[in-house]
Amino acid sequence: MTKVNYIEASGKVHAVDAEAGISAMEAAVKNAVPGIDGDCGGAAACATCHVYVDDAWIGRTGPAQEGLEKSMLEFAEDVRETSRLACQITLVDSLDGLVLRLPEKQH
Amino acid sequence: MTAIATARTQASEAMDLPLDKIDVSRAELFERNVEGEYFRRLRSEDPVHYCAESAYGPYWSITKYKDIMAVDTNHQVFSSEAGLGGIIIEDGIQKSSAEGAIDLPNFIAMDPPRHDEQRKAVSPIVAPANLAKLEGTIRERICRTLDGLPVGEEFDWVPAVSIELTTQMLATLFDFPFEERSKLTRWSDVATAEPGSGIVDSWEQRTSEIMECAATFQGLWNERMKNPGMDLVSMLAHSPATRDMTPQNYLGNVLLLIVGGNDTTRNSMTGGVLALDRNPKEREKLYANPGLINNMVSEIIRWQTPLAHMRRTAIAEAEVGGKTIRKGDKVVMWYISGNRDDEVIERPDDFVIDRPRARQHLSFGFGVHRCVGNRLAEMQLKTLWEEVMKRFSRIEVMEEPVRVRSNFVRGYASMPVKLHAL
């Protein structure tokens, strides 16, 4: 199990125990974390799972990848250096305790 | 003919043809509402199907959800460029006439990076913060329109509600003179029409109406250059990515935004009424639990699939579903078929308002060309249904609607209805 803390824009925290190996988008959808839609099912093709990786964790998740993830983030709202698509973050053991902040709304 | 007998005839019509003679681009299939049986057969027997001869030349049909996703997300191989034929099966329509075309470049028919730059110039208008500002106006207009409808008498839902509401929305987004807003609907219809479609009689007539649209929007551009507002014309006139566009590129983008905001939501507004009236159990579910509206809106958009297809052109050889697509081939992603694919969507022919994962449908497309106005469309539909439920117990569909003769816009020309009071 990998523990992930999703923090809404309002500050409300959703602590989720996710199976290792699934994506941070899937873990959020399975646990009904509000504000992550995942319309494309995890193909980095809709940008409805935009999150900000907490500064302490961005080194371990890495920044958005070249290719579709970066292209799709171009069209999201209020994109920052720590912006990722949650469906492209695989919850490996080393991410246990990961903190992801949610934008106010998904575009 | 009974409904069952009709369904049998449709199925046999689609089953009797040899596979290589199947041509799902025939617009009359959509007008007769029989395209579904053809796509069902392709999905089961030949999901990536080559049609060698059609009114639009040879083309591939991609009919399964996952194959469509693979093509839609691979813009490096599957190009949208207007010069290669653009984004609909008919090459010529995005220009203006059969001979002596006026080329109207617009960002949906461009590849990155130019596509990204121009799209970004207009996307703030449908960003969450701006949508929140628009919500009050949208609700007020929906209320006014619904309050003006006759209860207990038959009328045509399409012009009275669907066209009226989407046209008002467009006028707001462009800050277009409100009293002249019906021109926007006309230009939207003309922009996707061929002579003989019942909308325009000749290419000359089409060109002349498009030129009138160009002149009107040039006037708005000049005015907003000096006095910018928070509207689409001002955004295009002032954004570094678009302020130096050619007049043709400007007109192309204007027409794209008009068509994108018009034909689509309009037909989902009509389609939702039809779907709920045909499925009384779903209507009961909705009235028992209005919290289902958001989920229902996604289901309406899937069930209706207001744009039946998007087209790409292969710029390199590629394999899709085990078939080799060659460089230069025309590739048509049939969203209407992918949205009925039972490998991904359970009971896909049924309209189920509390369907799990209802947002996972193809109607907005996926990848860099995904519909920019999807959240606005959802908000308009959600607000419409919230206000309908406060006023009416049922919107009864009085006859089978008249469908549009088009393989692109999957929509309704008219649908007589009768409102029942609460």
Image (cartoon, coloured by chain):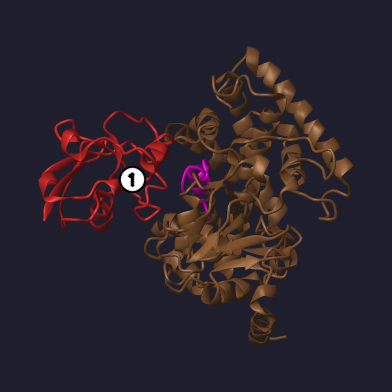
Q: Residue A56, relative to residue B277: is it above or below?
A: above
SS at badge 1: loop
Relative side of B29 to B47, left or right: right
Q: In the image, residue B46 lies at what x, y percent?
A: 55, 73
Q: Where is residue B60, by image quadrant?
A: bottom right
Q: Amino acid at mark 1?
A: Cys
Q: In the image, residue B277 lies at what x, y percent?
A: 58, 69
Q: Residues within 10 Å of mark 1 (few under 14, many from 20)?
A: many
Magenta segment: B362-380
Q: Residue A30, relative to residue B213: is it above or below?
A: below
User: Which residue occupies 30% across, 39% down?
Assistant: A84
Whether residue B168 is visible: no
User: Which residue occupies 14% across, 32% down?
Assistant: A56
Residue underneath mark 1: A49
Give chain B's shade: brown
User: Which residue occupies 54% across, 51% down?
Assistant: B384
Say which of A1 and B386 sits in front.
A1
